[in-house]
Amino acid sequence: MRFLISLLVALCALLAFVSATDYRLDYRPKKGESVAQFCKLWPAECQKVAFKHHYRGTVNSICERSPRKGVAQAFCTSEYKYETVQYTKEVAKDLGATFVY
């Protein structure tokens, strides 16, 4: 019994160290632009925006087709030391995309 309790405590402690956050938001590209075109532009714009605000950070971005037609799921973050800064909304605005609820 003690072994099971110890195992459970160890498992919970391990899970506390492993965390993930899904930063993706849904956007509809501007009129006349496909999701593929939008996602092709996303990484460069993310780099530009993130470096403008958070120069020494490591930039992470993803842009992919959403299960919904004509919608992309994307995020843009910059990480420096233990801080994560979101730039997704600013990148989307610069690319002329519309947030989808």
Image (cartoon, grey):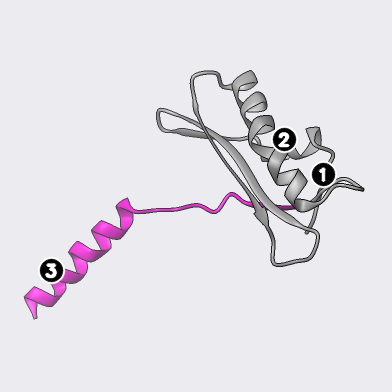
Instruction: Judge left or right: residue 70 versus residue 78.
Output: right
| Number of the label disc, if any, that sits on residue 97 | 1
Mark 3 or mark 2: whose residue is earlier in sequence: 3
Contact between marks 3 and 1 (CB within 8 A): the answer is no
Label 3: which residue? 6
Residues rendered magenta in the picture: 1-27
Pointer 1: residues within 10 angstroms few (<14), some, or many (20+)? many
Q: Which residue is situated farthest in the left direction here?
A: 2
The kind of residue tagged 2 is Val
Decide: is 39 above or below 95. Answer: below
CA–CA distance in space, label 3 to label 2: 47 Å
* CB within 8 Å, label 3 to label 2: no
| Residue depicted at 40% across the width and 28% down the height | 81
Q: Quadrant of the N terminus?
A: bottom left
Q: Residues within 10 Å of mark 3 (few under 14, many from 20)?
A: few
Dot 3 falls on a residue whose secondary structure is helix
- State the CA–CA distance, disc 2 to disc 1: 9 Å
Give the residue at mark 2: 91
Is tag 2's residue or tag 1's residue first in the polypeptide sequence?
2
Q: Earlier in the sequence, mark 3 or mark 1?
A: 3
Quadrant hosting residue 94: top right
In percent of the image, x 72 and y 54: which residue is there?
72
Residue 67: image location, x then y, percent:
69, 67
Up-down relation of residue 79 to residue 98 (above or below): above
Furthest residue toward right: 31
Q: Where is 74 relative to 89, above or below?
A: below
Estimate the x, y position of residue 19 in percent, counting from the top left. 40, 53
